[in-house]
Image (cartoon, grey):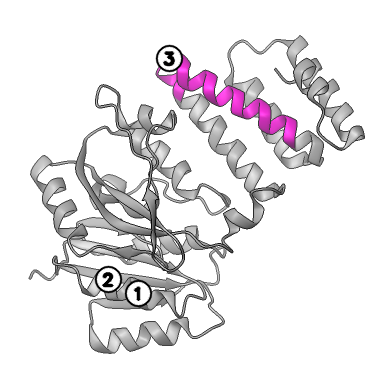
Amino acid sequence: MSNRPQISIIIPLFNREELIKETLNSILAQSFADWECIVVDDGSTDNSRDVVSSYIEGDKRIQCFNRPDALEKGANSCRNFGFTKAKGEYIQWFDSDDVMLPNKLTLEHSAIVKDGADYCISLATVTDENLNVLHPLKFQLDIQQTVFKNYAMGSILIITQMVLWRASFVKDKTLFKPFIKRGQETEVFSRLFFESNKFAFVDEKNLLYRQHADSKTTKNELSYVPAYKYSQAYISLQFMELGQQINDTEITKRYYKFCIYFLYEASIARDKKTISLLKKGLVEKVKDVSFGKVIKWNIGIGLLNAYGKKSDRIQNVFFN
């Protein structure tokens, strides 16, 4: 084994004292042994750090760092900080509640080396919080299209843990943006997939992706959370802009519609920050936005601000 590990596994950690054990055990059980595991604690208030320390005593390939106070709290900052500590030729960002199947790293490493790819994608199985299998994560890849096009159009769902990256490809790029609070990997992956279609693919399910009944997504899917909506709006504007750069009308139209709907929702919620982001972004990024259309949006925004709830009539007249 060389002094430089082949793969750096980077895990943000916050209050997962029970689940991190299963995650670390799955890493220790990998058939591929040339790895380092970098855990970045985000200020856990339970015994998570002690649990990781007990694993470090048994295996020096595992390390644990505290997120520096100067960095914004959150998994994105931890992922970025972990990358600065990584020595591996390949990077596997992972989560503290999910489980690798035993051959995940072996298969992905073999594929990315064989193909000389910038990244390797493998598949995932969705489970409940007890790791009971629910269903495979959607992945219907059209090989006639780029990974970016497949991703943008929603035919493939890719979560952070499904991708092994070549470190030299992601080096010096903007990685995870701390202000993105929902769809963190979607924002960064959209940019990376857009830049390169040089990928390897392992057509096997190598990951158990745990969904919790009390997850943030589950708790907030029926409520309006401004930080989440701002993130979704930002990502949609980005997809729309990238679609325009390659003159792809399907992508552009898809995300224009998302942006208009988010503008409608933000107006109901009186979410000024998201409204401002979308109005500015749509005017700057959409080539044919007329002055009249902007006036319509402003009227609709004012009506919804006053009305304070959904209105199909207002939506149809002013947000179409």
Report helix, strand or loop for mark 3.
loop
The answer to whether 255 appears left or right of 313 in the picture is left
Q: CA distance from mark 1 to mark 2?
A: 6 Å
The answer to whether 115 appears left or right of 295 in the picture is left
The answer to whether 306 appears left or right of 268 in the picture is right
Instruction: Please give the name of the residue rendered at 40% of the width and 63% of the height, measured from the top-left corner.
Output: 95
Amino acid type for the residue under numbered disc 3: Asn
User: In the image, which is nearer the foreground, mark 3 or mark 1?
Assistant: 1
Instruction: Please give the name of the residue rendered at 28% of the width and 34% of the height, measured from the top-left corner.
Output: 196
Instruction: Please give the name of the residue rendered at 82% of the width and 40% of the height, measured from the top-left corner.
Output: 270
Q: Confirm whether the magenta stretch covers residue 81.
A: no
Question: What residue is disc 2 on?
Answer: 26
Mark 2 surroundings within 10 Å by alpha-carbon count, few (fewer than 14), some (14 through 19), many (20 or more): some
Amino acid type for the residue under numbered disc 1: Glu
Q: Are marks 1 and 2 in contact (CB under 8 Å)?
A: yes
Q: Magenta segment, which residues?
A: 243-265
Q: Confirm whether the magenta stretch covers residue 257.
A: yes
Mark 1 surroundings within 10 Å by alpha-carbon count, few (fewer than 14), some (14 through 19), many (20 or more): some
Quadrant of the frame with the C terminus:
top right
Q: Earlier in the sequence, mark 3 or mark 2?
A: 2
Q: Which mark is residue 247?
A: 3
Relative height, residue 278 to residue 127 (above, below): above
Q: CA distance from mark 3 to mark 2?
A: 43 Å
Quadrant of the frame with the N terminus:
bottom left
Across and down, in percent, residue 185 comes to: 44, 48
Relative height, residue 305 to residue 222 (above, below): above
Question: What residue is disc 1 on?
Answer: 22
Report helix, strand or loop for mark 2.
helix
Amino acid type for the residue under numbered disc 2: Ser
Q: Quadrant of residue 303?
A: top right
Across and down, in percent, residue 278 comes to: 67, 31
Q: CA distance from mark 3 to mark 1?
A: 45 Å
